[in-house]
Amino acid sequence: MGLARRIAELFRIKAHKALDRAEDPREVLDYSYARQLELLNRVRRGVADVATSRKRVELQLDQLRTSAGRLEGQARQALSLGEEEIARQALARRTAALAQVDDLQGQRESLKGEEERLTLASQRLQAKVEAFRTRKETLKATYTAAEARTRISESVTGISEEMGDVGTAVQRAEDRTAQLEARASALDELLASGALQDATLPAGHDDLQTRLDALTAGGDIDEQLARMRRQLEAAPPPSADRDEAG
C-alpha cells in the first residue's frame, strides 16, 4: 500500500471514529423515520393527484354522454321537421362526442389502474414505515438502556479502580510503617549494645567512658561516706560538767 493510500485510510478511520463519537443513533433513527414519512406523503399525494385526474375524466365522460344524447334528440327532431341537413350535423357532432368518450374511457381505465397501483404501493410503504417506527422506538429504548448501563458500569469500574488505588496506598503505608518500626527497634538494640554512639552524650564520651564514669562516681560517694564516719568517731563526746553547767 502506497503512502498516500495509507494516509487516506488513516484519515478515513479517524473520521469514522469521530463520527461514532459524535453520532447519536437515536437521532439517526428519528431522521430516517422522518424521511420515510416524507416519502410516504409524496406517494399519497401522487395517489390523490391520480384520483383527481380520474375524477376529471369521469366528469368529462358524463358531460360528453349527456351531449351525445342531446345531439341524438336534436337529430331526430330535425329529421321529423324535414331538416335533414340539421339532423346530419347533429349526428356528426354526436359521433365526434362518442369518439371522445371512447378516448376518455381508455384514459379513465389507465388512471384507475395507476391509482390502484399507487394505492397498493402506499399501503405497503405505510406498513413498512409503521414497522420501522416500532423497530425504531425499540432500538431507541434499548440504546438508552444500554447507555445507562454503560454509564453505571463505568462509574462502578471507576470506583473499583479508585478502591484498588486506595488499597495499594494503604498497603504501601502499612509496609512503610512496618519498615520504620523494624528500623527503630534495630536502632534501639544497637544503642543498647553499644554498637552505636548515643548522640545525647557529651563530646568525647562513649559508652565505655560512661560506664567508667558511673563507677568512679559511685566510688567517690563511698569515700565521702567513710570520711564522714571517721570524723564523727574522732570528735570528743559531750562531758558531764558541761551538762551540769548548762
Image (cartoon, rainbow, N blue to C red):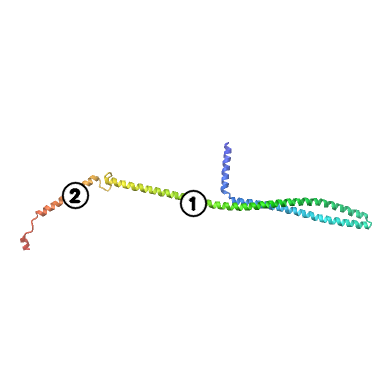
Q: Which mark is residue 74?
A: none
- Label 1 CA crowd tier, 10 Å (few <14, some 14–19, many 20+): few
Quadrant for the N terminus in the image: top right
Question: 7 above or below 135?
Answer: above
User: Which residue is the site of mark 2?
Assistant: 218
- Residue drawn where x is 42% and y is 49% of the image: 167
Q: Secondary structure at mark 2?
A: helix
Residue 76 % position (x, y): 91, 57
Quadrant in the rendering for residue 240: bottom left
Q: Amino acid at mark 2?
A: Gly
Q: How many marks?
A: 2
Residue type for callout 1:
Val
Dot placed on the residue nearer the N-terminal end, 2 or 1: 1
Residue 110's x, y, as percent? 77, 50
Q: CA distance from mark 2 to mark 1?
A: 73 Å
Q: Are marks 2 and 1 in contact (CB under 8 Å)?
A: no
Residue at x-position 30% and y-position 46%: 187
Q: Nearer the viewer, residue 234 or 26?
A: 26
The C terminus, quarter of image: bottom left
For label 1, the residue is: 156
Residue 187 seen: yes
